[in-house]
Amino acid sequence: MHVVPLPRHLSPAGQGVLELGGSPRVAVPSGRLLGLGRIVAALLGGSAQVGGEAEVTLTLGAGDGEEYELVVTAEGATVTAGSAEGLFRGATTVAQLVTEDRTVPCVRAGDGPALAWRGLSLDVARRFFTVEQVKRVIDLLALYKFNVLHLHLTDSQAWRLRISAWPRLTGPESYTHDDYREIVAYAAERFVTVVPEIDMPGHVLAAVRAYPELGGEDEPAHPLVPFLDPRAEVTWRFVADVLGEVAVLTPGPYLHIGGDEAFGMPHELYAAFVTRALGLARAAGKRVVGWQEVSRSGALTSADLAQCWVGDGDAFDPEAARKTAPPQYHPLIDLAAAAFEQAPHDVPGAVAAGAAVLASPSRVLYLDRRYAEPSVLEEQNERRERVGFASYRPMTSREYFGWRPGELVEIPAGARLAGVEAAIWCETVGDFDDLAFLLLPRLAGIAEKAWTDRATTWEDYRERVRTHTARWERLGWGGYYRSADLFT
Ligand code: TNX
């Protein structure tokens, strides 16, 4: 019973097994849920129907939100939940219980999430991923009961979402409105909410290159780190166009306005910018998420979310970064190191403002950290030296599992924890296999932390997750890291 994340309750119910056969039937209670039935059937390699006899039956009953109950007997598997979302979460448990010989052990399970927000931030700005590739990411998120895909759509290297009134922002490797809608719809069918991030007022070199008037009149601290100037009229035409358009394209309730690392921007300008951007996002009908620095604006409220990525436990090694980064980036390394020192002070401010906290401390939730343990596949060890941010201390997969959401040193006691979000930054990611290499197996461990409030052990988790590799291969994630911590 190798289920990840571990359900709240899961126990064997007798000796028998359910034979799924070559094409199991998935029954849903009404035509309205046939779409869900088809998605679940695809997970199991079968077909969907309304009512009738079936190997897997989804029924609406008691239960809140994502909670579900599961009973598997030799006659069939039944998932019961109060919502379609709960049915889907339960179905992913069934999918994970399927053995290589296409049987499901007889079990009883009762399950639900410990945290409401379980996300992954995907950096499509530094490395473009096609719609098909993003769908593969969503498949993985769904398998592990994540419910948020945060798309880091813009950064200094590139802007990836077309904006009608500002066509020069995007190049050929970008999402059209239809592409973006397709991603959002695919995610929604799997109960994953897309949260789009437009990173401002720093991290905007791509926008300033396309529209130099966005760079303001003052010299930035370095030509590579311009910022959007709140005193310029053009800034607000731009921000209103962008946030308005993204809000309309996004059915989900959240808009992420970035706010991190506005290197060299005077405090008054930063605060003025964030305050007005928060207002525009709210006026567009969205709840706002920002990186923790946005608390410096003094304008956060209890409706907002502060995504906390650096705290007292974090470290950034500028010397290590200098060894690998090209010389023209060296001034930025010092600016980044300074930001890492300053940013921890922004977390208490966000908590005091009443904002909910989204925990993303780089120490355990940034997946662009290098692996300290070797791969059991010799040819992967070259990649280990290349992929992942050089300025973070490499960590073993086992170390990476050693945290719990409520006990993070980076998040002050008393914070209102909305949930946790992993982040995969892609400066060092060259292709999809590099992405697979950094995401798996570690993402599964994060799912376990985010979903279950049971104190599961590394040894127990390891035995479960190491059986998932065939599933990863089938979903197109064959590039996963053959970590010696897990696979020896
Ligand atoms: C800091 S975390 C950044 C990103 C980088 C990342 C590398 C954050 C809000 N900003 O721009 O990609 O470090 O790990």
Image (cartoon, rainbow, N blue to C red):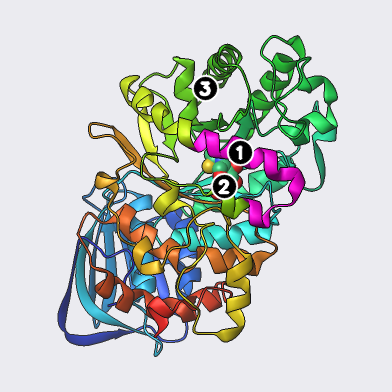
Image quadrant for the N terminus?
bottom left
Instruction: Count how many numbered circles sit on residues in the image.
Output: 3
- CA separation, marks 1 and 2? 7 Å
Camera-side residue: 170 or 423?
423
Query: Within the magenta stretch, is there residue 454?
Result: no
Q: Nearer the viewer, mark 1 or mark 3?
A: 1
Question: Label 2 near label 3: C-beta < 8 Å?
Answer: no
As helix, strand or loop, the secondary structure at mark 1 comes to helix
Residue at mark 2: 318
Amino acid found under the numbered disc labelled 2: Pro
Q: Quadrant of ligand 1?
A: top right
**Spatial separation of the CA atoms under disc 3 and disc 2:** 40 Å
Residue 241 appearing in the image: yes
Q: Residue at x 26, y 86 (%)?
A: 17
- In-image side of 340 versus 333 (left or right): left
Q: Which residues are magenta?
A: 322-340
What secondary structure is marked by label 3? loop
* Mark 1 residue type: Asp
Residue bearing mark 3? 285
Magenta stretch contains residue 335? yes
Please tell me whether the stretch drawn in magenta is mainly helix, strand or loop: helix
Q: With 481 as the anchor, is 387 left or right in this view?
A: right
Q: Which residue is mark 1?
A: 334
Q: Position of residue 468 (x, y in %)?
A: 42, 77
Give the SS element for disc 2.
Answer: helix
Q: Where is residue 122? Give x, y as percent.
A: 57, 50
